[in-house]
Image (tube, rainbow, N blue to C red):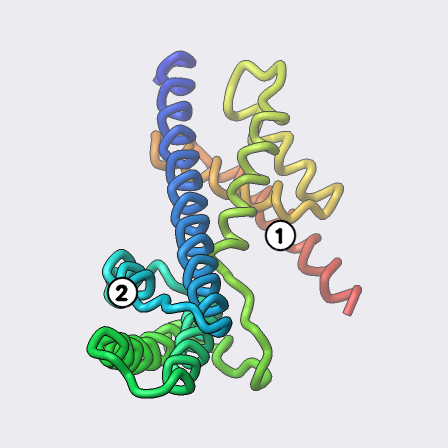
């Protein structure tokens, strides 16, 4: 594989990587906006306004959330709290109309499905399920998105003036070892794996990667 082919392959890989980051960001923004709208509907209902039509529209628009993986555990908990408050406000308003009764049933359906979804997500999170009760768990997807953004920026900075991806790998490994830079370590591992998949001999780089990993591991242990 010549230099041009290597750069073209890497550019394609990074383009796919960036598209994935953008997609995840758009999905999170969509979820945040949807929850904000639901909160606004519930808030207006608490002020005595009839928001049953708006609530019905919201349920119809976001019904897919009950079956896909858009929601994180904090999202599920927040939606359930808003829906329960909304249900209470409907009950306080007096005798339920047909449309309000339908909203009641829809809230119950969401609450039951949300409880199952919440349990499923917690089981998938393994050790994180042992978090202290009441403590809001971190959104690991968002954390990974931020990590990908940092890695992309680091890669662009490291590429400056380089003529080959091997030089980039060298500099990343140096940064990981000398600066105990965890992001550089992760990115160098990614580059090394890419090189391996494209037929390069990576044994010396794997050795340097392990050395850098050991240095960073010692730094973490020493700081505890």
Q: Residue furthest right?
A: 223
Foreground disc of the pair 1, 2: 2
Q: Is residue 76 above or below residue 143?
A: below
In which quadrant of the rendered image does the N terminus lie? top left
Q: Position of residue 122 (x, y in %)?
A: 41, 77
x 34%, y 36%: residue: 197
In which quadrant of the rendered image does the C terminus lie? bottom right
- Number of the label disc, if any, that sits on residue 213: 1
Q: Is residue 165 above or below residue 215?
A: above
Q: Is residue 62 above or below residue 16?
A: below
User: Could you tell me how far apart the alpha carbons at marks 1 and 2 are, in whole angstroms?
Assistant: 53 Å
Is 107 displayed left or right of 179 in the figure? left
Which quadrant of the structure image shows residue 77?
A: bottom left
Instruction: Please name whichever residue, 137 or 87, is drawn nearer the observer in this view of the structure.
Output: 87
Whether residue 113 appears in this view of the structure is no
Crowding at mark 2 (Cα within 10 Å: few <14, some 14-19, many 20+): some
Q: Position of residue 93 (x, y in %)?
A: 40, 83
Element at badge 1? helix
x 48%, y 80%: residue: 129
Crowding at mark 1 (Cα within 10 Å: few <14, some 14-19, many 20+): many
Q: Is residue 181 above or below residue 218?
A: above
x 33%, y 61%: residue: 54
Instruction: Please name whichever residue, 24 or 64, is drawn nearer the observer in this view of the structure.
Output: 64
Is 36 displayed left or right of 159 in the figure? left
Q: Position of residue 161 (x, y in %)?
A: 62, 14
Q: Identify the mark nearer the N-term, 1 or 2.
A: 2
The residue that mark 2 highlights is: 56
- Number of the label disc, if any, that sits on residue 49: none
Which quadrant of the structure image shows residue 107?
A: bottom left
Element at badge 2? helix
């Amino acid at each position: 594989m010549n230099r041009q082919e290597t750069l073209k392959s890497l550019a394609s890989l990074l383009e796919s990587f960036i598209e994935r980051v953008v997609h995840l960001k758009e999905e999170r923004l969509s979820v945040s906006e949807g929850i904000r709208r639901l909160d606004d509907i519930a808030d207006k209902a608490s002020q005595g306004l009839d928001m049953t039509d708006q609530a019905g529209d919201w349920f119809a628009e976001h019904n897919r959330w009950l079956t896909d993986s858009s929601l994180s555990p904090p999202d599920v908990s927040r939606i359930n709290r808003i829906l329960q408050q909304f249900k209470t406000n409907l009950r306080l308003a007096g005798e339920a109309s047909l449309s309000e009764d339908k909203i009641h049933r829809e809230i119950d359906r969401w609450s039951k499905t949300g409880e199952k979804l919440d349990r499923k997500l917690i089981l998938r999170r393994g050790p994180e399920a042992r978090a202290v009760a009441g403590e809001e768990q971190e959104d690991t997807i968002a954390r990974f998105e931020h990590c990908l953004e940092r890695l992309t920026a680091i890669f662009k900075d490291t590429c400056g003036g380089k003529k080959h991806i091997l030089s980039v790998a060298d500099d990343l490994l140096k940064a990981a070892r000398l600066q105990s830079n965890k992001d550089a370590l992760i990115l160098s591992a990614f580059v090394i794996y890419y090189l391996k998949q494209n037929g390069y001999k990576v044994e010396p780089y794997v050795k340097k990667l392990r050395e850098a990993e050991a240095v960073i591991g010692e730094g973490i242990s020493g700081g505890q």
